[in-house]
Image (tube, helix red, strand yellow):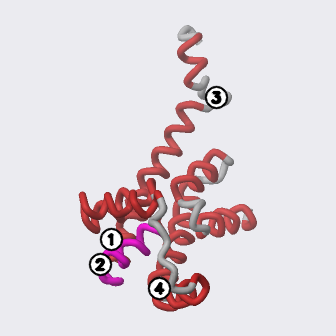
Amino acid sequence: MFLSYLIIFLLAAIPLLEIAAIIPVGILGGLPAFPVMVLAFTGNLLTVILLIVFLDKIKDWRRKRKGNDEEAPSKKHKRARGLWNSYGLFGLTFIGPFFVGSHLSALLAITFGSTKKRTLTFMTASLFTWTILIGIGSHYGFDFFIADEENLGFITRILHPEK
């Protein structure tokens, strides 16, 4: 059981495998919703905090690695800029995790002019909110769709309402 929870924590910490993917997978895999939610939130938030704290060192490392060549903005960068222009820090941190990921949202929020402290505050609130919504939605949603001895499942209830 410990290994399962460790895997949830580590996968949620990986920038591309965020809470939006890991929480449903963990709950669908049969783990209790609350521990999955806590560990996924903690893993994702930990790496966002590390990114924000060490942002200057990451920028220096990237600059040395890439040189002074300016690259054309990527699709994710353009989407994030559009969110920033339309909705500001709130939009980028609350909507961004689904479109560009929480790590990139935090990085770009600071790049676009937000302070590290405000970005961390908004990202923490965003990750907490999405953890609750995704966790509850996954828990009750999968219970609704999956059949077992007590629950016939969504498809069975539609096809055989007499059961």
Q: Can see residue 137?
A: yes
Residue at the spot 55% in from the left edge and 60% down from the top edge: 18
Mark with earlier residue (2, 4): 4
Mark with earlier residue (3, 1): 1
Furthest toward the front, the residue is 69
Q: Secondary structure at mark 4?
A: helix
Identify the residue position indicated by label 3 in the image.
147
Calculate the distance from the C-alpha at mark 2 to the C-alpha at mark 4: 13 Å
Q: Quadrant of the C terminus?
A: top right
Residue 79 located left or right of residue 91: right
Q: Please determine whether, in this image, residue 88 is positioned above or below residue 114.
A: above
Identify the residue position indicated by label 4 in the image.
55
Calculate the distance from the C-alpha at mark 2 to the C-alpha at mark 3: 47 Å
Q: Nearer the viewer, residue 123 or 84?
A: 84
Q: Mark 4: which amino acid?
A: Leu
Q: Nearer the viewer, residue 153 or 125?
A: 125
Calculate the distance from the C-alpha at mark 4 to the C-alpha at mark 3: 47 Å
- Closest to the camera, between mark 4 and mark 3, is 4
Identify the residue position indicated by label 1 in the image.
122
Identify the residue position indicated by label 2 in the image.
114
Q: Please determine whether, in this image, residue 44 is positioned above or below residue 142.
A: below
Residue at the spot 70% in from the left edge and 65% down from the top edge: 7
Mark with earlier residue (4, 3): 4
Contact check, label 4 and label 1, Cβ < 8 Å: no
Kindly indicate the quadrant of the structure image that contains residue 65: bottom right
Q: Which residues are magenta?
A: 104-117
